[in-house]
Image (tube, grey):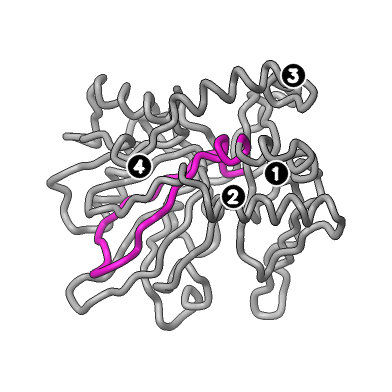
Amino acid sequence: MSAALSIGVGAPALRDGAAAALPRHFDLNDDAAYQAWRAGRLAAYPRRADELIVEVRRPQALSEAELAALRERCRRANMAVYATSGLADDAGSAAEAARRIALQLGLRTVDVNYLADDDGITPLSVHEQGPRSGYIPYTNRAIRWHTDGYYNPPERSIRAMLLHCVRDAASGGANRLLDHEIAYILLRDEDPAHIEALMKPDVMTIPARSEEGEIARGDQSGPVFSIAADGSLHMRYTARTRSISWKDDAATHAAVAALSRILDSTELALQLRMSPGMGLVCNNVLHDRAAFADSATRRRLVLRARYFERIAL
């Protein structure tokens, strides 16, 4: 593989430590800038999941038109869905296609998270036994709203992720998708104090994870909403109620309840059930997963990759 196509695995490269100035539309005291940004985001946002789909002929070498179409969807919604045909029902070839698509969108540095394969890509399927069986992504149960890697420390923030469907389930397994910028808008419209509460550096804590009696990962605290050095909005969130601790004050309780209600009721959530050869590539937007059922001949397999970069636009 040439140097131009190399894929980094592990921690992200060190960035310039200087923080960017806060974009005016994220300043809670600048309502005019916020309203202008808000109007643009809502006007561009798709109302149906099929508006995200881009047909791709050769994932290893996207055409200029295909690449431009994927980027256009990401500008509108922080996500796009590619649809390929002719890929074998094989995790290896699917993983290579997914890697190549991600690379062409500027996603190079894979987070080799717990239970991922050596290349950083995680095969998600039902496991009845073994270490994976104790984690909900490896079951057929529903998964609530979340962004990926919410338990990572700030220096390993997941900025983008990819889901590639190798095989779909016999029934169920659809995802709901929501741009985290839209979630921010809906919550700020209700009360800017909710945003202020969820930007506190200690608002959400994920307790330590132990393996065989030893600490594998310590407690991880951080904000829900934060502004990255490049001025983009980052969201770290899970709607799960177990293995999570929220700051114990009235402002946090109100903000968490409002966000949960908004996510469960908004009509701006996009529903997508991926078919084999389809993939979601996104700037770590909010997503969930419906419960599903496999059969003897159709066992759901989805590949997941998490990246430290954002999609290059």
What is the span of residues highlighted in magenta in the rendered image?
A: 157-185
Instruction: Select label 1 or label 2 by which is in front.
Output: 2
Task: Answer whether residue 9 is visible to the viewer in this image.
Answer: no
- Disc 2 versus disc 4: distance between alpha carbons? 34 Å
- Type of the residue with mark 3: Ala
Residue with the most extreme bottom position: 129
Label pair 2/4, CB-CB below 8 angstroms: no
- Disc 1 versus disc 2: distance between alpha carbons? 26 Å
Q: Which labelled disc corresponds to residue 21?
A: 3
In the image, residue 266 lies at what x, y percent?
51, 47
Work out whether 232 lies above or below 140: above
Say whether residue 62 is left or right of residue 244: left
Q: Which badge, 3 or 4, is on the more N-terminal residue?
A: 3
- Type of the residue with mark 4: Arg
Residue position marked by numbered label 4 in the rendering:
99
- Type of the residue with mark 2: Ile
- Element marked by disc 3: loop
Q: Which badge, 1 or 3, is on the more N-terminal residue?
A: 3
Residue position marked by numbered label 1 in the rendering:
154
Instruction: Select label 3 or label 4 by which is in front.
Output: 3
- Disc 3 versus disc 2: distance between alpha carbons? 29 Å
The answer to if 179 sits in the magenta stretch is: yes
Q: Which badge, 3 or 2, is on the more N-terminal residue?
A: 3
- Type of the residue with mark 1: Pro
